[in-house]
């Protein structure tokens, strides 16, 4: 696990960082796929996977421990420019809006928040969701079947004037918020929900075998 410095120091050039937050329960190749696309298409130096201690919108039941999720994410990342960080634990923040507010004060860094279209569609359910968009540029990655709903939903309509062309995505991280881009991309089949379901099925079969 690689952690950022406790006191970031100013650099000759701002470090351009994509932030991919989530439970990572578990991390999978879809997370890696989006991250590598973000490095390339957004012109980033690094992508940080912010493994949340607990997502307030997700149930506690079935949630692996933070240590397990961090270790699993590190195994999936497998790239020198992808960093796995339980940063909210270090900062003492629970909500994305609070985490971004803290990071906005870090010298020598420029951040862009990364999320799938499904999260844009449900963004109005987030705590102080408007602050998220008004604090940090946001890159939205296409994810079926949520893409259409996301682009016509409450969050997209509220910040329609802040939408940028996908052709300008390479400069998004240096823009002042609010600014967001919808990124079209080939879908990736990986799903944390499907992975957990598969694990549960295999465990049930194993239990049945032991009971015989």
Image: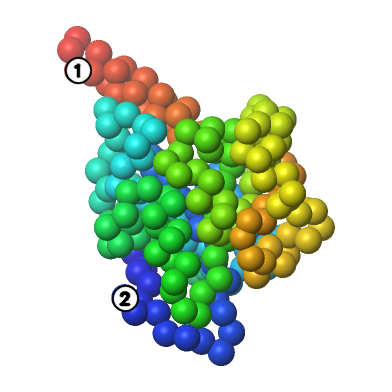
Element under disc 2: loop
11 relative position to 149: left or right: left
What is the quadrant of residue 175 in the picture? bottom right
**Badge 1 local density, few (<14 within 10 Å), some, or many (20+)?**
few
Find residue 93 and report its horizontal and vertical position in percent. 31, 54
| Residue at disc 1, secondary structure | helix
x 63%, y 56%: residue: 178
Q: Residues within 10 Å of mark 2 (few under 14, many from 20)?
A: few
**Above-or-below relation of 64 to 132:** above
Using the rendered image of the protein, determine whether residue 30 is visible from the camera's viewpoint: yes
Q: Earlier in the sequence, mark 1 or mark 2?
A: 2
Q: Which mark, residue 169?
A: none
Image mark for residue 210: 1
Would residue 99 appear left or right of 187 to someone viewing this image?
A: left
Residue 6's disc number: 2
Image quadrant holding the C terminus, namely top left
């Amino acid at each position: 696990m690689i952690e950022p410095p406790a006191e970031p120091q100013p650099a000759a050039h701002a470090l351009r960082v994509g932030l991919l937050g989530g439970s990572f329960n578990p991390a999978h190749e879809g997370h890696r796929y989006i991250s590598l696309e973000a490095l390339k298409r957004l012109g980033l130096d690094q992508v940080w996977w912010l493994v949340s201690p607990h997502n307030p919108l997700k149930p506690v039941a079935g949630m692996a421990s933070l240590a397990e999720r961090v270790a699993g994410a590190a195994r999936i990342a497998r790239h020198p420019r992808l960093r796995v960080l339980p940063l909210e634990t270090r900062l003492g923040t629970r909500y994305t809006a609070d985490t971004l507010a803290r990071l906005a004060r870090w010298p020598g860094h420029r951040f862009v928040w990364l999320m799938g279209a499904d999260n844009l569609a449900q963004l109005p359910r987030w705590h102080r969701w408007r602050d998220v968009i008004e604090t940090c540029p946001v890159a939205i990655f296409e994810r079926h079947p949520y893409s259409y709903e996301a682009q016509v939903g409450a969050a997209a309509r509220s910040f329609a004037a802040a939408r940028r062309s996908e052709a300008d995505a390479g400069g998004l991280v240096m823009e002042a918020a609010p600014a967001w881009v919808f990124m079209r991309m080939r879908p990736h089949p990986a799903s944390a929900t499907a992975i957990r379901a598969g694990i549960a099925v295999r465990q049930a079969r194993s239990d049945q075998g032991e009971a015989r």
